[in-house]
Amino acid sequence: MSTTLDTVDAETLERVIAKATPEQRLYLVEKLLPRVIEDGRYLPRLVYDSKGELLGVLVPEFRSKATEPPKLTPEKQAEIQRRLDTLDDTITHEELLKDLGLADVPLPRRL
């Protein structure tokens, strides 16, 4: 990766993480995770292991600090109203997963 964080490049961060003790890694997670959640606007995040395999989905508890509802565009408001007016013709489960950013998450196989 060629991404940099001021003067610290991704390779340096990777080395720091690799050499960190379990306690140090836990400290990093405790410090970084709240910021990652806030930066991601409390949306679910996919979590992968070092092999790139899906470990799970982090679903943060949303704690809004808003004092009023978000401003919606006229298009969004019209879509919400359409869904309310036609409850039998809303969105599919796949569309909901896509809206949540979870469209590519493999569902566990049911026995």
Image (cartoon, rainbow, N blue to C red):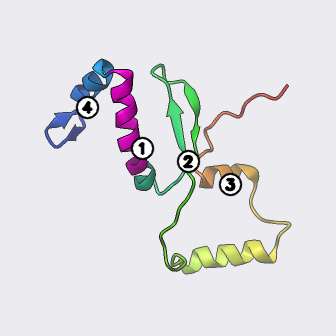
Specify the quadrant that holds the N terminus. top left
Spatial separation of the CA atoms under disc 2 and disc 1: 12 Å
Spatial separation of the CA atoms under disc 3 and disc 4: 34 Å
Q: Mark 4 points at which residue?
A: 10
Q: Mark 2 points at which residue?
A: 44
Q: Which is nearer the N-term, disc 3 or disc 4?
A: 4
Frontmost of labels 3 and 4 is 4
Position of residue 15 measured from the top left corner of the image (x, y, whole percent): 26, 22
Q: Which quadrant holds residue 7?
A: top left
- Indicate the secondary structure of the residue bearing disc 1: helix
Instruction: Evaluate if marks 2 and 1 touch, with contact meaning CB atoms under 8 Å apart.
Output: no
In the rendered image, the vertical position of residue 19 relative to residue 36, given as above or below = above
For this rendering, which residue is in front, 83 or 31? 31
Q: Which is nearer the N-term, disc 3 or disc 1?
A: 1
Q: Which segment is the magenta one?
A: 21-36
Q: Mark 1 points at which residue?
A: 33
Spatial separation of the CA atoms under disc 3 and disc 2: 13 Å
Position of residue 6 measured from the top left corner of the image (x, y, whole percent): 16, 43
Q: Which is nearer the N-term, disc 2 or disc 4?
A: 4
Position of residue 66 measured from the top left corner of the image (x, y, whole percent): 48, 73
Number of numbered discs visible in the structure rendering: 4
Frontmost of labels 2 and 1 is 1
In the rendered image, the vertical position of residue 52 relative to residue 4, given as above or below = above
Mark 2 belongs to which amino acid? Pro
Mark 3 belongs to which amino acid? Leu
For this rendering, which residue is in front, 71 or 81? 71
Specify the quadrant that holds the C terminus. top right
Spatial separation of the CA atoms under disc 3 and disc 1: 25 Å
For this rendering, which residue is in front, 89 or 58? 58
- Indicate the secondary structure of the residue bearing disc 2: loop
Q: Which is nearer the N-term, disc 2 or disc 1?
A: 1
Q: Name the residue under label 3.
A: 96
